[in-house]
């Protein structure tokens, strides 16, 4: 992509009402634009990040055996009256009426709808388990939308729903999502920690929030330091095998959100040196709730003895749009974003220091063609801006690799490669540059 054709409206001033780094940087780097309280347009640069995040989430859901579909954003109130949640949900639900004065709503979540879809199509326990998901916009009329896309009113969520014959089987579905989530966030470069979370009236231990530690996080969390660098299962993990030992390993150490934390138990079970009290961002939540919806909505399957059984369900959410913010909180400096390669809007920023100079233009055209031909995503700064402005812009938008091409270097047959993550620089022979950068990109994208 040529920058001259792209749409990258950068802000010079730091927006005054943006309190945290990710919100500031997303606005400054032209990733999003606010269109209303908690409602954002995803501009081309931000949209590319959102799509990368979404795709990683999708690949790991598919790997775990979940099946993708798409449910609508607008739902009928009657469906929610069946579960009793239409009145219970309160003001967070955006209620709408259609031209026939029928009560509708913009879905804040999809338990009711998926239960309705399930009950229409599944008859026998032999068809279980089922794991269905979609990636769709939600609307919740949050009291305090803030921190940009971190707590929006309209936001993109991946929500999976599991259907099983009994609690033991439901735990297997739960474990699949537990492991899928560990992998999903790790592939983005994030260290997520599963923490015990509220289960509501049904109790049990099958509710975890996946938290990324960050000073600006909204949740207060209490955990054991040893969880932070726990190695995550690799892509070869057998999702049809027994995942319980993996889940046990991650739940062996203390980790709980504020609502679930028993401070005395925390002190008692974790040594001083390992005790972390911190703040974190909830990027995912997995939750088993049994027959909470299947009972009132009568979602049953014929069991082995022919008797109808209410299916046991769970739901599993990932904050896809929130992750864009969470990633910046984890990866930035004073100059801008520092995208990990798998979620970067482009892999390489190609900087032509002297547009109009034959040597520089020629070298850039060749690098651009070679890299693009090898599947590397390049944003080519072919604008007439001064070098200082180009450097600042590249640092702000935070592409992982910057290839800097100028007449002076070219006289010696070299271009410069800057790695945004650590600021390191090295010279590369022009002839070898595309292959070298391609190799760096490919190794960073390798799925482990
Ligand atoms: P929170 O406690 O942050 O309000 P929640 O418990 O309401 O979250 P869930 O209903 O479990 O969230 O939704 C699944 C995921 O969707 C959350 O883990 C979070 O990452 C994301 N999410 C929830 N609310 C928002 C929001 N207002 N803006 C952006 N992402 C959100
Ligand atoms: Mg909420």
Image (cartoon, rainbow, N blue to C red):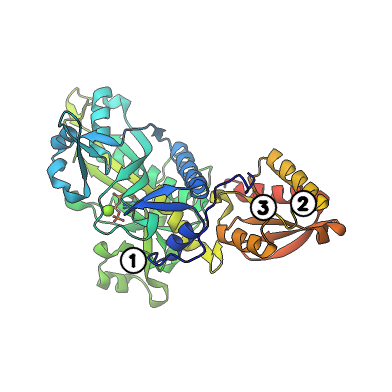
For residue 51, side relative to residue 425 (left or right): left
Reading the chain from its start, which is encountered first: label 3 or label 2?
2
Residue 126 at x, y = what percent?
30, 25
As drawn, the label of residue 221 is 1
Tag 3: Cα neighbours inside 10 Å, few (<14), some, or many (≥20)?
A: some
Reading the chain from its start, which is encountered first: label 2 or label 1?
1
As drawn, the label of residue 356 is 2
Which image quarter is the N terminus in?
Answer: top right
How far apart are labels 3 and 2 at the CA level?
10 Å
Which residue is under mark 3? 383
Q: Is residue 108 above or below residue 212?
A: above
Tag 1: Cα neighbours inside 10 Å, few (<14), some, or many (≥20)?
A: many
The residue at 30%/43% (across/down) is 315
For residue 305, side relative to residue 163 (left or right): left
How far apart are labels 1 and 3 at the CA level?
46 Å
Reading the chain from its start, which is encountered first: label 1 or label 3?
1
Local SS, label 1: strand
Residue 191: tell me if it is visible.
no
Label 3 C-beta lies within 8 Å of the nearest ligand 1 atom: no
Residue 302 at x, y = what percent?
21, 24
Q: In the rendered structure, are the residues bearing label 2 and label 1 in contact, judged by CB atoms less than 8 Å apart?
A: no
Residue 10 at x, y = what percent?
53, 57
For residue 38, side relative to residue 97 (left or right): right
The residue at 27%/70% (across/down) is 265
Local SS, label 3: loop
Judging depth in this view, the residue of 423 and 159 nearest the camera is 423
Tag 2: Cα neighbours inside 10 Å, few (<14), some, or many (≥20)?
A: few
The residue at 36%/32% (across/down) is 70
Which residue is outermost to the right?
A: 412
In this rendering, which labeled residue sits more in front, label 2 or label 1? Answer: 2
Judging depth in this view, the residue of 197 and 438 nearest the camera is 438
């Amino acid at each position: 992509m040529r920058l001259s054709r792209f749409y990258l409206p950068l802000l010079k001033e730091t927006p005054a009402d943006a309190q945290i780094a990710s919100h500031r940087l997303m606005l400054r780097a032209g990733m999003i634009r606010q269109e209303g309280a908690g409602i954002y347009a995803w501009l081309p640069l931000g949209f590319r990040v959102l799509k990368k995040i979404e795709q990683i989430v999708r690949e790991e859901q598919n790997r775990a055996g979940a099946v993708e579909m798409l449910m609508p954003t607008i739902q009928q109130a009657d469906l929610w009256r069946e579960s009793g949640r239409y009145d219970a949900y309160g003001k967070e639900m955006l209620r709408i009426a259609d031209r026939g004065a029928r009560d509708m709503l913009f879905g804040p979540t999809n338990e009711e709808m998926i239960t309705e879809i399930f009950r229409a199509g599944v008859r026998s326990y032999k068809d279980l388990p089922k794991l269905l998901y979609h990636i769709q916009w939600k609307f919740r009329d949050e009291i305090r939308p803030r921190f940009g896309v971190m707590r929006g009113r309209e936001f993109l969520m991946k929500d999976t729903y599991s259907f099983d014959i009994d609690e033991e089987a439901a735990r297997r579905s739960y474990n699949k999502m537990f492991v899928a989530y560990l992998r999903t966030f790790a592939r983005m470069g994030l260290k997520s920690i599963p923490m015990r979370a509220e289960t509501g009236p049904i109790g049990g231990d099958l509710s975890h929030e996946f938290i990324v530690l960050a000073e600006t996080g909204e949740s207060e969390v209490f955990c054991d330091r040893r969880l932070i660098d726990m190695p995550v299962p690799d892509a070869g993990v057998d999702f049809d095998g027994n995942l319980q030992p993996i889940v046990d390993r991650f739940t062996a150490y203390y980790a709980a959100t504020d609502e679930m934390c028993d401070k005395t138990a925390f002190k008692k079970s974790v040594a001083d040196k390992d005790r972390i009290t911190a703040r974190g961002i909830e990027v995912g939540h997995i939750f088993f709730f049994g027959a909470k919806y299947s009972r009132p909505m009568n979602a049953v399957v014929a069991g082995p003895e022919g008797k109808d059984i209410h299916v046991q369900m769970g739901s599993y959410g990932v904050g896809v749009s929130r992750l864009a913010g969470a990633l910046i909180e984890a990866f930035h400096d004073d100059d801008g974003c520092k995208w990990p390669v798998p979620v970067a809007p482009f892999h390489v920023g190609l900087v032509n220091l002297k547009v109009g100079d034959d040597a520089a233009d020629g070298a850039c055209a060749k690098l651009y063609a070679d890299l693009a031909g090898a599947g590397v995503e390049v944003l080519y700064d072919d604008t007439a801006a001064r070098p200082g402005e180009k450097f600042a812009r590249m640092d702000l938008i935070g592409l992982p690799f910057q290839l800097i091409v100028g007449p002076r270097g070219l006289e010696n047959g070299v271009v410069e490669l800057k790695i945004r993550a650590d600021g390191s620089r090295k010279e590369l022979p022009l002839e070898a540059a595309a292959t070298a950068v391609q190799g760096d990109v490919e190794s960073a994208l390798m799925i482990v």
